Amino acid sequence: MRTIACALMFSAAIAATAQQKPIILHDAALVDGTGAQIRPHVDITLHKGYIESVKPAFKKAPKDADIIDCTGKTVIPGLISAHSHLGILLDNATPSANAYTTENVTAALNQFERYGVTTIVSLGLNRDLVYELRDQQRAGKLGGATLLTAGRGFGVPNGAPGLDVAPDQIYRPANADEARKDVNELAGHHADLVKFWLDSGHGKIPPMDPAVYTAILEEAHKHHMKVAAHVYNLADARSLVNANIDILAHSVRDQAVDPAFAQSLIAHKIWYIPTLTLDETFYVYASDPDVMKSSFFQQAAGPQLLAKLQAPDYAEKTLASPQTEQAKKDHEIAMKNLKTLYDAGVSIAFGTDSGAVPGRIPGFTEHRELEDLVAAGMTPLQAITLATGENGRLLHELNPKLSVGLIKQDYSADLLILSADPLMDVRNTRHIEAVYHHGVLVPNTPPQN
Ligand SMILES: [Zn+2]
C-alpha cells in the first residue's frame, strides 16, 4: 500500500528520520488495530516513518538499530478522529469568530498529537487557511496530528450550524445552483471530503432544503468526493440514505433505530460515526465532576476552560438547564443505537466532535469516547479497533495515499506505548508512555494520572 506518492507526501518528515537507524520497540504486547487479540512478545521495527516489520521478539539484539525495551508495555496504533473541529474556540474555552488562526489551529493539532490522536478529520467550519496548513504539513513544515479536512462545509441561511464562526468558515447556499458552485470551489481546493448539516433544531430553525443537499451530493460525487452529514433524527437519516450519503456524522438520537435501517446502511456501505461524547459534554462535568480530577484531563482542558467548569455556579446551572435533560436522553438513545448498529454489522467509525464547543477537548475527548463506547456495550478491543483500524479504513477511502490505523508493515509508524493494558480497562489508553507519529517521538506527552 505504500506508494511513491505517499513517500513524497511526507517527504520532509521522512528526511528528518532518514539518517536515523531503525527503532525496534522490543518485547511489546501488541494490539495491532485489526481487531485481533493482543499478541505478546513482539518486536515492532520503525524506519523512515513507516512500520518496517512486526516479528516475534528477538533473542539476540540486532546491530544498527536503536532498541527501546517495551517489556510489560502495550503498543496500540495512534488514535484517529474522523469527526473533530479546529479554530472554533479560543483557549479551548471561548467560541470566537477570530479563533481560526495558524497559531490556534496548530496548537490544537499539537494537543491532539500529544494525547495520542495522530490523525484527525476537521469536519467543516474551516477557513480556507486550512488548505495552506495541510500543504505545509504534507511538506513536513508543520507538525501535529495529520490533518484531513472538509473545508468550510455547508449550512443553511439562518439555520444550522448555529455556531459563532466567521462568514468564511461556512457556505450557506440559498439554492441548488449556489450549492453546486460552492462544491466546485471546494473540489478546486482538493478538500478530502464534503460536509453538510441537516438539522431543524427540534423544529426551531429551517432545515436544509432536500434540493440543496441533493445538489451537494450529486456534485461532490462527480468529483469523487465522499459526503458526510450532520444528522439528528431517524427520518432525516433515512432521507440521506436514499440520497446516497456516504457518512452519517452523528448518532440517530430521536428514537431507536430498527433492523431495516441497519440493513440500509450496510447495503449502501454507509459509515456511521456515533460521537457519543457529544451530548455528554453538555452536562458530564456537572453531573460527574470526578471526570475533571486527573492531570491528564486538566492539562488538556487548560486554565480558562477549567475555570469555567469549576466555577461555583456551573454545576447547579448546568443541571437545571432544559438542554441537559434533552442531552441526557439523546446520549442514552445514541448508546443504544450504536450497539444495535454495531451488532448488525454496520461500518462504525470513530469521532467526537472535539473542538466544536467548550468541554469537547482535543485529545482528552477521544479517550473519553473510548470509555463511552465500552459503556455502550462494546469490549475495549472493539472500541480501540474502531478508533484505529476501522477509522484507518474510512480514511483510506477518503485518501488512498493514506495508510494509517494499523501496526502492520508499510503503514505509517503512528503508535502509542502504554504502561498498562487497555484491554483490561479501556481507561488505560490514558497511560501514555510515548507517542510516535511518522516514526518520530512526540514531545510533551500528557501526565498519566
Ligand atoms: Zn461536528
Image (cartoon, rainbow, N blue to C red):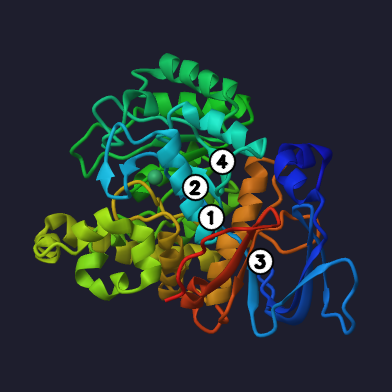
Is residue 345 visible to the viewer in this orientation of the structure?
A: no
| Nearest-to-viewer mark from 4 and 1 | 1
Res. 109 mark: 2
Within the image, what quadrant is residue 42 found in?
Answer: bottom right
At 57% from the left and 81% from the top, the residue drawn is 421
Q: Quadrant of residue 442?
A: bottom right
Residue at numbered disc 4: 148
Q: Amino acid at mark 4?
A: Leu
Pick whichever of labels 3 and 2 is earlier in the sequence: 3
Q: Position of residue 228 (x, y in %)?
A: 49, 40
Residue drawn at the location 48% of the way across and 56% of the way down: 260
Label 2 with label 1: CB-CB less than 8 Å: yes
The residues tagged by marks 4 and 1 sit, at their Cα atoms, a distance apart of 14 Å
The image shows residue 210, relative to residue 92, as above or below, that is: above
Position of residue 323 relative to residue 189, above or below, is below
The x and y percentages for residue 14 are: 75, 46
Q: CA distance from mark 4 to mark 3?
A: 20 Å
Which residue is depicted at the point 26% across and 39% down? Answer: 200
Give residue 441's position: percent from left, percent from top.
Answer: 64, 60
Q: Is mark 1 within 8 Å of ligand 1?
A: no
Q: Which residue is mark 1?
A: 113
Q: Is residue 293 left or right of residue 8?
A: left
Q: Amino acid at mark 2?
A: Leu
The residue labelled by disc 3 is: 33
- Ligand 1 under 8 Å from disc 4 Cβ: no
Q: Earlier in the sequence, mark 4 or mark 1?
A: 1
Q: Nearer the viewer, residue 370 or 221?
A: 370
Helix, strand or loop at mark 3 = loop
Give the spatial CA distance, label 1 vs label 3.
18 Å
Q: Could you say where residue 43 lies in the image, as x and y percent from the top left?
A: 79, 74
